[in-house]
Image (cartoon, rainbow, N blue to C red):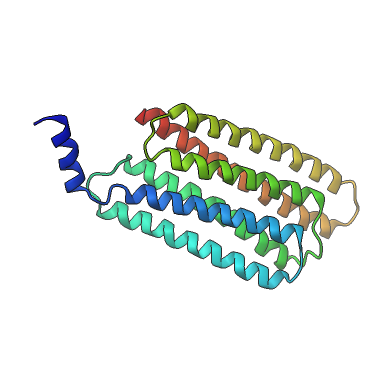
Amino acid sequence: MNLGCIVGLKEWIVPQDKAFFDLFEQMADMVNEGAVFLNVIINNYVDVQNQCHKMKQIEHQGDLIAHQVYEQLNRTFITPLEPEEISRLATALDDILDYIDGTTQQMYGYGVTETDDFMKELARLILLSTQEVQTAVRLIRKLDDPRAVEQHCIEINRLENLADVVLGNAIKSLFATNDAITIIKLKDIYENLEVATDKCEDVANVLSDIAIRHS
């Protein structure tokens, strides 16, 4: 049997192979949509309850797509990536959106009345990171240029390092004040925004591993 026949046979046996890549791209798009909306909320901090409700809807859509990935994994015999890689990537993408949504819900729950430059800068870095995630996720469908995937992963790591610096400056500024309740509230929010960039880095690590293993 020649190579063409083998490839064709695999496609016949596992016609849903490409569904994983479709779902990952949908998840990455939803994560980026959450990051875009996070910036809208933080830069125009009005009607917060309604805005948080809209964010929760985005997060719910992300959960539904993640659930489809796990369902697909359970019923697919031969997968285009290792099952562990598929599970790790789905979880890592879902985690980003969970932290984006969780932080906006936290801001509303804590009764935050206004945002500041630290929040705006962290939200901007989150958005830049999710844009890199979007692009890198699309590259694993064919993996004809693993170095391109790695370049986006390196950029995500760089953005996460910048977020660490912003967090450090935010906390330093915060502890120069004397309002203990405000310190507690804002410290939590700053830290959770920074964790969203950590979760983007987790995605980058999974994508980098995939690129290396399958190149």
Q: Residue at x 49, y 39 (%)?
A: 136
Quarter of the image that includes the N terminus: top left
Left of 198 or right of it: where is 124? right
Q: Residue at x 74, y 43 (%)?
A: 167
| Residue 84 % position (x, y) | 36, 42
| Residue 209 % position (x, y) | 43, 32
Which one is nearer the viewer's eye here, 175 or 133? Answer: 133
Q: Quadrant of residue 85?
A: top left
| Residue 18 % position (x, y) | 32, 48
Q: Is residue 6 above or below residue 75?
A: above
Left of 143 or right of it: where is 100? right
Q: Quadrant of residue 74?
A: bottom left
Q: Is residue 49 above or below residue 162?
A: below
Which one is nearer the viewer's eye here, 134 or 201? Answer: 134
Q: Residue furthest left?
A: 1
Left of 203 or right of it: where is 100? right
Q: Is residue 120 above or below residue 85?
A: below
Q: How many marks?
A: 0
Which one is nearer the viewer's eye here, 200 or 128? Answer: 128
Quarter of the image that includes the C terminus: top left
| Residue 149 % position (x, y) | 48, 33
Which one is nearer the viewer's eye here, 195 or 41? Answer: 41
Q: Residue at x 61, y 60 (%)?
A: 101
